[in-house]
Amino acid sequence: MDRRQFLSIAFLSSITSSTLVGAAPFGLHIQKKKNSMERKSNNVTPIAICTWAFSNASKQAGEALERNAAALDAVIIGVAVEEANLKNTTVGKGGTPDREGNVTLDACVMAPNGDCGAVACVENITHVAALARKVMENTPHFMLAGKGAEEFAYANGFKKENLLTETATQQWKEWLKTSEYKPIINIENHDTIGMLAIDAQGDIAGACSTSGLSYKMKGRVGDSPIIGSGLFLDNDVGGAVGTGMGEEILKTVGSFLIVELMRQGYSPQKACEEAVHRVVTKNPDHTNFQVAYIAMNKAGEIGSYCIHSGFAMMKYQDGKNETITSPSFLK
């Protein structure tokens, strides 16, 4: 199916405030289901997983799946919760600014049919994962960046918002006193929400959204909007997302690596472990940064692994929302 055919079977639906806690409407397109006879049979009950202990995000996505939402709709709903969460300093509104005091956001999405979209260095737009979906569905491009992405957002009904909160402003001013740039392991200055979902039809989709490294250089883009690094999936195999030090994830194209390992027969757990091992064997400085992955295969099996202990993932399935602590390379 090409992009135009895909668009022709989509229809508009509004998102209620109860679905996106505290989030403004952003014109989310809800994907229309195909006839069940066109889908592959699948015995897995719907699952939503995400990085870190973002329990409300996994809950919102999981409950959407229980309402028979498509996987792509569910992950957009899930990450939007954290994009609107002012207490989350690494995603969306309330994110930590760059060294110039500007909050810039990155995101990408990937659909079951292999289509993908991304945005980078976006200012003044909260729900950048939904914006990445608009790029995927409404343009001939994969990625839009900076002012171009922002203007595209306004043209598609997204609201202009000041992403820099008073709390973030005060913290930035305090940081300027020393201007020391040193990511802190497992502290929210370099984290991401990455989410994967399998819907009732057995289709897999993913989304990734972040404000990037705290006090990054102006214009810095990490792994999160890069398909194959921050997020990758193959609907016949499974999917993976990464979080932590984006520069290190980019070097090994970690999410793509995990999916290819699963294609070769690795379990999601073993594939995540191998991806982390690739990072630590390439960089002797790995004791000073965190990299973590989560993955899910077509059978609904999951896995996670990280360099340093302290990372966890969320899983929602069959009405149960649980935090799963990840094993680590370093104890």
Image: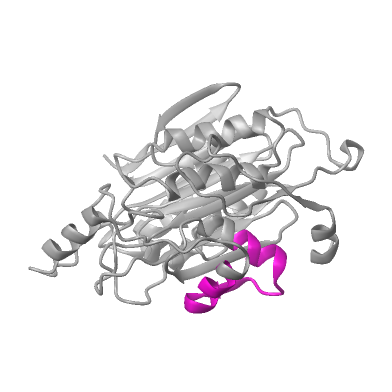
Which residue is outermost to the top? 319
- Is 228 drawn above or below residue 149 in the view shown? above
Q: x and y percent of residue 229 in the render?
A: 51, 62
Which residue is outermost to the left? 177
110 magenta-colored: no
User: Magenta region: which residues?
Assistant: 132-153
Residue 189 visible: yes
Looking at the rendering, which quadrant does residue 281 occupy? bottom left
Front residue (pair 88, 284): 88
Which residue occupies 26% across, 70% down?
A: 101
Which residue occupies 31% across, 61% down?
A: 164
Which residue occupies 50% across, 35% down?
A: 58
Q: x and y percent of residue 6 in the render?
A: 81, 58
Please indicate whether residue 53 sits to the left or right of residue 266 in the image.
Answer: left
Please indicate whether residue 331 sits to the left or right of residue 8 in the image.
Answer: left
Image quarter hosting the N terminus = bottom right
